[in-house]
Image (spheres, helix red, strand yellow):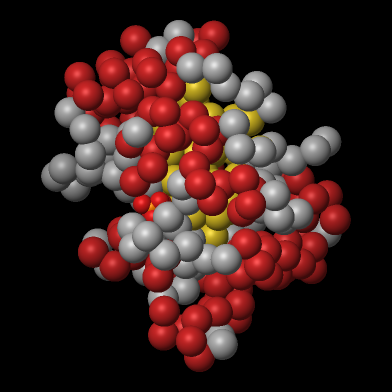
Amino acid sequence: MARKQIAAGNWKMNTTISEGVELAQAIASAQRSDQTLTILGVPFTHIYPLQKKIKASSKILLAAQNCHHLKSGAYTGEISPTMLAAMKVPYVILGHSERREYNHEDNALLSLKLRAALDSGLKVIFCCGEALDIRKSGEHISYVKSQLAASIFHLSAQEMKNIVIAYEPIWAIGTGETASPAQAQEMHEAIRKMLLKQFGKRVAENTSILYGGSVKASNAKEIFGQPDVDGGLVGGASLNAAEFVQIINAF
Ligand code: PGA
């Protein structure tokens, strides 16, 4: 089984429902490579309307951008993985650096969220990545290893089928600065080696590892062309249908 090529958008806290529907419809109706799995990470409010408006035949899958680590309870304002699974949302993004930073989500909490999401039947796009000072110190690979060790190394090989890893160097997110294709490849190869050591050849070969951080139509082809880069998690550029479709078609 060859691993999936994935172009995932992360809309973050952008678009009203009507803007989001328009954006998703424009992406859905464009000529897209059917080799590439298209995922849209949308605000919670948009999930139901998009499910109604986007035809199943357009082969666009939705992702939530977060979920709680418990199934239910007195947690005002939270959304549980059980709720998402009941809506048949296939994916949830966990561990995004913005949530790690602004919502103080640490490796221990993310490990609980991951467990809850998988137990509810969701697939997880799990983000990791280092800040600039760590990159400069040369410790980036061991730092990412510690993030993955804390959150995913204890999973079973079977559970790893439901994990997509997104490597997102924090210094490249929303900054316009992109990791060079060689920097992306170095980390992706290192992550794949970690998977090999931890889970064996099958998991290492079949787990999609996405790059995120200022992916654009102009740089996607070169980044996606690296042997261990299986696609992208795209923020800003996923808010423009024409640009995102070029990224989907960049493999
Ligand atoms: P960006 O965001 O493409 O705007 O840099 C990527 C992300 O945060 O997932």
| Nearest to the observer: residue 46 or residue 223 | 223
Question: Looking at the rendering, in which quadrant would you find the C terminus?
Answer: top right
Horizontal side of 137 relative to 204 (left or right) equals left
| Nearest to the observer: residue 34 or residue 176 | 176
Up-down: is 81 above or below 141?
above
Q: Would you say residue 125 is visible in this rendering?
A: no
Q: Position of residue 15 (x, y in %)?
A: 21, 33
Question: Looking at the rendering, in which quadrant would you find the N terminus?
Answer: top right
Horizontal side of 85 relative to 140 (left or right) equals left
Horizontal side of 150 relative to 172 (left or right) equals right
Q: Residue furthest left?
A: 76
Toward which corner of the image does residue 50 lie, by quadrant?
A: top left
Q: Would you say residue 182 is visible in this rendering?
A: yes
Q: Residue furthest bottom?
A: 137
Up-down: is 104 above or below 131?
above
Q: Position of residue 236 (x, y in %)?
A: 34, 46
| Nearest to the observer: residue 220 or residue 79 | 220
Q: Position of residue 19 (x, y in %)?
A: 22, 24
Please give the count of numbered marks on the rendered protein. Answer: 0
x 20%, y 19%: residue: 18
x 43%, y 22%: residue: 27
| Nearest to the observer: residue 47 or residue 171 | 171
x 14%, y 44%: residue: 76
x 47%, y 62%: residue: 178
Toward which corner of the image does residue 149 lie, by quadrant?
A: bottom right
